[in-house]
Image (cartoon, rainbow, N blue to C red):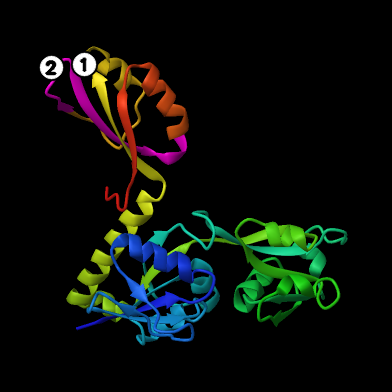
């Protein structure tokens, strides 16, 4: 039996392959134009496909599971099982925002000001629902991406996703409103989720991907600490639980090991050294499963 899984093609592709690799799954492309990656797991049948289409194919049962954005689930209005929320995107570990944007020098200050205007977007259904909720009647046209270049000469506003806002700033655009905050979701077809084998396989996959994602922001630290300074050192040590303390052959010293957020290590290491810790080693992590 195989689990048919949709892998997002495009901006999320490399980030997704990297996450799977860290989770223990290797994907290889036979050519740059292939849509069928090879995997070292014989129970997986991956298909590389645009994330915009994955919710629809999962809902229809053509795919059992898939990774796609919450934005595309909402835009499609797909009836699927949302198994996991994975906060990663093409450049960062941050969610993306679907925003309504206009030129910096325009007179528009809210969605209400777009009555009768033209809006370009890939998110046609999501935008139409947003306008309806705000009692705005505007013309929404589908755009094949690159919406930023269309304002103000072709349209009055755009609805796009943004991760850092750099593209909007580069095109002299400002955000009027946020329609949706979106993260990558692992979704399943409802019948596939009710199948015991497919559900177990999907849950195993989710656990390993979650563990790999957890590890992205964490590192391990090992060190030797004088036994007399152990309480002092552990008093300012963050850890997932409590530090692991092991005896050394020398009775006056212990080995200490912790897992911490990578962002605090640069401030933590000098404190550890001044507190008497020696032989401090920082090492990367592949998976952290809570």
Q: Nearer the viewer, residue 228 or 188?
A: 228
The 10 Å Cα crowd at callout 2, few under 14, some 14 to 19, many 20 or more, is: few
| Picture layout, residue 280 above or below residue 92 | above
Q: Which residue is mark 1?
A: 227
**Which corner quadrant of the image does residue 195 belong to?**
bottom left
Contact (CB < 8 A) between labels 2 and 1? yes
**Residue 170 x %, y %:** 76, 60
Whether residue 230 can be seen here:
yes
| Range drawn in magenta | 246-264
Residue at the spot x=24%, y=75% of the render? 41
**Comparing marks 2 and 1, which lies closer to the viewer?**
2
Residue at the spot x=87%, y=62% of the render? 106
**Residue 78 x %, y %:** 46, 77
158 sits left or right of 265 in the view: right
**Residue 3 x %, y %:** 27, 79
The reply to whether the magenta stretch includes residue 251 is yes
Q: Which mark is residue 169?
A: none
| Picture layout, residue 19 above or below residue 123 | above
| Picture layout, residue 147 above or below residue 247 | below
239 sits left or right of 87 in the view: left
**Residue 111 x %, y %:** 75, 64
Residue at the spot x=83%, y=61% of the render? 108
The reply to whether the magenta stretch includes residue 275 is no
Q: Between disc 2 and disc 1, whose residue precedes? A: 1
**Which corner quadrant of the image does residue 30 belong to?**
bottom left
Give the structural element (helix, strand or loop) at label 2. loop
Q: CA distance from mark 2 to mark 1?
A: 8 Å
Q: Which residue is mark 2?
A: 251
Whether residue 243 can be seen here:
no
14 sits left or right of 245 in the view: right
């Amino acid at each position: 039996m195989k689990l048919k899984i949709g892998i997002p093609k495009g901006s999320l592709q490399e980030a997704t392959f990297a996450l799977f690799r860290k989770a223990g799954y290797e994907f290889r492309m036979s050519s740059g134009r292939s849509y069928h990656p090879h995997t070292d797991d014989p129970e997986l049948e991956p298909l590389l496909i645009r994330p915009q289409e994955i919710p629809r194919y999962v809902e229809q049962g053509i795919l059992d599971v898939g990774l796609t954005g919450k934005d595309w689930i909402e835009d499609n209005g797909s009836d699927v099982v949302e198994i996991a929320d994975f906060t990663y995107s093409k450049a960062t570990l941050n969610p993306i925002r679907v925003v309504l944007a206009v030129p910096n020098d325009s007179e528009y200050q809210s969605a209400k000001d777009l009555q009768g205007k033209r809006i370009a977007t890939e998110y046609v259904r999501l935008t139409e629902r947003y306008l309806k909720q705000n009692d705005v009647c505007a013309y929404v046209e589908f755009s094949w991406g690159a919406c930023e270049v269309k304002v103000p000469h072709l349209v009055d506003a755009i609805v796009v996703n943004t991760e850092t806002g750099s593209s909007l700033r580069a095109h002299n655009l400002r955000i009027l409103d946020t329609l949706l905050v979106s993260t990558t979701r692992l979704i399943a077809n409802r019948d596939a989720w009710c199948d015991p084998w497919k559900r177990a396989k999907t849950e195993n996959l989710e656990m390993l991907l979650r563990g790999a994602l957890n590890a992205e922001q964490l590192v391990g630290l090992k060190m030797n600490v004088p036994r007399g300074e152990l309480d002092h050192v552990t008093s300012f040590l963050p850890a997932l639980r409590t530090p692991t303390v092991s005896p050394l052959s020398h009775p006056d010293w212990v080995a200490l090991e912790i897992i911490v957020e990578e962002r605090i290590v640069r401030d933590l290491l000098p404190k550890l050294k001044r507190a008497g810790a020696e032989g401090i080693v920082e090492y990367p992590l592949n998976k952290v499963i809570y």
